Image: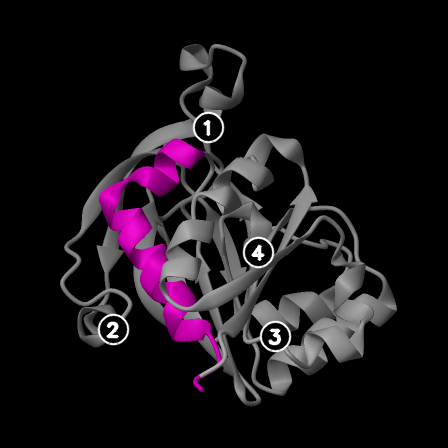
Amino acid sequence: MSPRRALIVRGGWDGHHPIATTDMFVPFLEENGFEVTIEESNEVYADAGRMSGVDLILQAVTMSSISDEALRGLRAAVEAGAGLAGWHGGIADSYRGSSDYLQLVGGQFATHPGRHPDERPGDESDNYLDYTVEVTELGRRHEITAGVDDFVLHTEQYWVLHDDLIDVLATTTHPTQEYHPWHRPIVSPAVWTRLWGAGRVFVATPGHTPEVLADPNVRTIVERGLLWAARTP
């Protein structure tokens, strides 16, 4: 049997460590029978010939932009059966100017509420909080999150705008605080899947740094999510 093909597309904002984080999962993919190719530009999506042979797209491109041709290619590849997977801003905060990308993924980063203003040192840890990732009832039965208990992280807690076509495997709750303007707690998806044509989409919002992805719970979820999303031979 020929190996399945995984395409890693990485770039965008360097603060999410697109090279270091994706490199963490290359050995895992290879051990699971994937031939891995890495691209530093999302223009590869516009190459229909290359995309037709891809079984899994692992994207780590925070913000940035995407051409109309590349976006059409990405959507066509997923609809035809290629899996699309990623974590944090590399998939949930990509291409803010594209509503068609948002529709494909099903959720978009809105903010990450920070610590009390008096407790902020003035660096990226301003937005680091202790928060709980809670596995849903669906998540307890799903192959990606089965056997994973609720767990606590100290990192950015994503607030995600989303639609009802996603299957939510885990959530996180943003509490009310005296220094925030909202008036009741907000429950936001933290891990979800989506079916799109013949393809599958997997998103995990934790993953701000390599250290977060090294958390045993996060790593397990991401590894399982990559395998789940990939096209089945």
Q: Does label 3 or label 1 sit earlier along the sequence?
A: 3
Element at badge 4?
helix
Question: Is 51 within the magenta?
Answer: no
Residues at marks 2 and 4, CA–CA distance in whole angstroms: 21 Å
Q: Which residues are magenta?
A: 210-233
> Which residue is under mark 3?
54
Query: Quadrant of the rendered structure where residue 19 is?
Result: top right
Residue 132, horizontal then vertical, whole percent: 25, 44
Q: Amino acid at mark 2?
A: Glu
Mark 3–mark 2 contact, CB under 8 Å? no
Kindly identify the residue that appears in the image at 70 percent across and 72 percent down: 74
Element at badge 3?
loop
Residues at marks 3 and 2, CA–CA distance in whole angstroms: 23 Å
Residue 133, horizontal then vertical, whole percent: 27, 50
Residue 51, horizontal then vertical, whole percent: 70, 75
Q: Residues within 10 Å of mark 3 (few under 14, many from 20)?
A: many
5 versus 155 height, above or below: below
Q: Amino acid at mark 1?
A: Asn
Q: Is residue 106 left or right of residue 33?
A: right
Q: Which mark is residue 127?
A: 1
Kindly identify the residue that appears in the image at 19 percent across and 71 percent down: 137
Q: Does label 3 or label 4 sit earlier along the sequence?
A: 3
Q: Quadrant of the N terminus?
A: bottom left
Q: Nearer the viewer, residue 153 or 33?
A: 33
Element at badge 2?
loop
Q: Does label 2 or label 4 sit earlier along the sequence?
A: 4
Q: Residues within 10 Å of mark 1 (few under 14, many from 20)?
A: some
> Which residue is under mark 4?
91
Residues at marks 4 and 1, CA–CA distance in whole angstroms: 19 Å
Query: Quadrant of the rendered structure where residue 69 is?
Result: bottom right
Q: Residue furthest front?
A: 1
